[in-house]
Amino acid sequence: MKNVARMALENGMVIGEDVYSYKNKLIYPKDTVVDDSVVARLSRYSIMCVSIMEDIDYATTHFEKVRLSSEFKTFELTYNNCMSIYRKLMKGFVEQGTPTKMGSLMELYVKISSRARGGEQLLDFLYNMLPSEDDMTYAHCLNSALIAGVFGTWLNLSKEDIVLLIQCAFFYDIGKLKLPQDLLWKSGKLTDLEFTKLKTHTMLGFDMLKDRDMDEHVLKATLMHHERCDGSGYPSKLRSDKIDIFAKYIAIIDAYEAMTSARTYRVSLNPFQVIANFEKEGYVKFDEEILKPILSHIAATQIGFTVRLTNDVEAKVVQINENHLTRPLLQAGDEMIDLAKEPDLDIAAIY
C-alpha cells in the first residue's frame, strides 16, 4: 500500500485501510472504491491522506509479490543495463576475437548482485527475470555467474575460489554462441543429429579460450561441465575423480539455472520441483558432497512460505526433512502434516 494525499486521489483507486475521523468515527472501511463522493466526504472530515492499494497488495504467490516489488524493479533495470554490456562484450569476443577483460565482467557481477539484499533474494529476482529470445543464451551465462556467487558462499568456498567460480560461469557456455538459436532453444526433443551438434559446444568453447590468458579451471569448466560422475556425460565420459572440481560446481549451477529460468515451452520450476529433479539421479551424476548442501540450502529458503498441496489444502512450511528435502513438515491450522509420511500428497504451488 501507499499513502496518497486526498488531492491526488483518482476515481477507481481502492482504500487499503479503514479511514477514521479525528473522533475515531469510521468514515470508510478498507476496500472502498474511490469516486468523487468519497473524496468530497474525506474533505468534509479534513482527512488529508489515505492508504491506497497497489498491485503488489493483490499478489497471491511469493513470486508475484517479488515481481511487483520496488526492489525487483530496481534490480531488473540494473540487470537489463548490464545485460546489454555483457552481450556486447561476449559478442565481440566470439565474433571478432576482441579481448574481454575479466575485471569488466566482475564489475557487472558486482553491479547486479549489489541490488539484492542477499543470496536468497538474488535467486528470487533471477527466478522472475524473463529475457528476450535473442538474449536467452547470454542470460543463461550471466545468471549462472550470479548463481555461482550464491552457491559458492553456501559451500563456504574461499573468497578467491568464489571469484574464480564466478569467472568460470561467465565463460563456460560460450561455445553455444557459435550454434544456431533454434537448435539451442528447440522446444521439442532433439534428434540424434541435433543432439550431437549441440554437444559440440563444450569443445567449441574450449577452443575459443585455450589460447587466451585464462585460468586452468575456467578452461576445464568449459570443457567438462557436461561430464557426469557416473561416466555418462560428454565429451569424454569422464568419471568423478577425473572431473575438475570447478566443472563439478558449474555442472550443478548450469542445471539449476536451466530449471529455474522460464522457457518459451514451459514455466520455471519451483524450488521443491528443482530439488526433486536433482534427487531423481543427482547423487549419481553430480558430486554428492557438493550437491547435497546446495539442495539443503534451497529447501531451507522455503521455510515460512505457504504451499498449496495437491488436495488443495494450504499449509505453512515449518521444518525441512533432511532425509527427504521435497517432503517438509507443514502446518495447516492446528494440524501438522509430515509429507514424508504422506506419499499421495505433493506440493502443487508455493505462495
Image: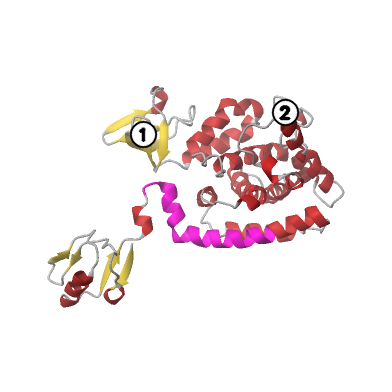
> Which of the marked residues, 1 or 2, is nearer the chain's N terminus?
2
Evaluate whether residue 128 shows in this view: yes
Question: Residue 112 at what x, y percent from top left?
Answer: 59, 58
**Residue flagged by tag 1: what amino acid is it?**
Leu
**Residue flagged by tag 2: what amino acid is it?**
Asp
Badge 2 is on which residue? Answer: 192
**For the point 72% across and 44% down, which residue is it?**
180
**Span colored in magenta:** 60-86
Residues tagged 1 and 2 counted as in contact (Cβ below 8 A)? no
Left or right placement of residue 181 versus residue 236 in this view: left
Q: Nearer the viewer, residue 116 or 180?
A: 180
**For the point 74% across and 41% down, which residue is it?**
221
Label number found at residue 84: none
Left or right placement of residue 215 versus residue 115 in this view: right
Label number found at residue 330: 1
- Please determine whether, in this image, residue 140 is positioned above or below residue 103: above
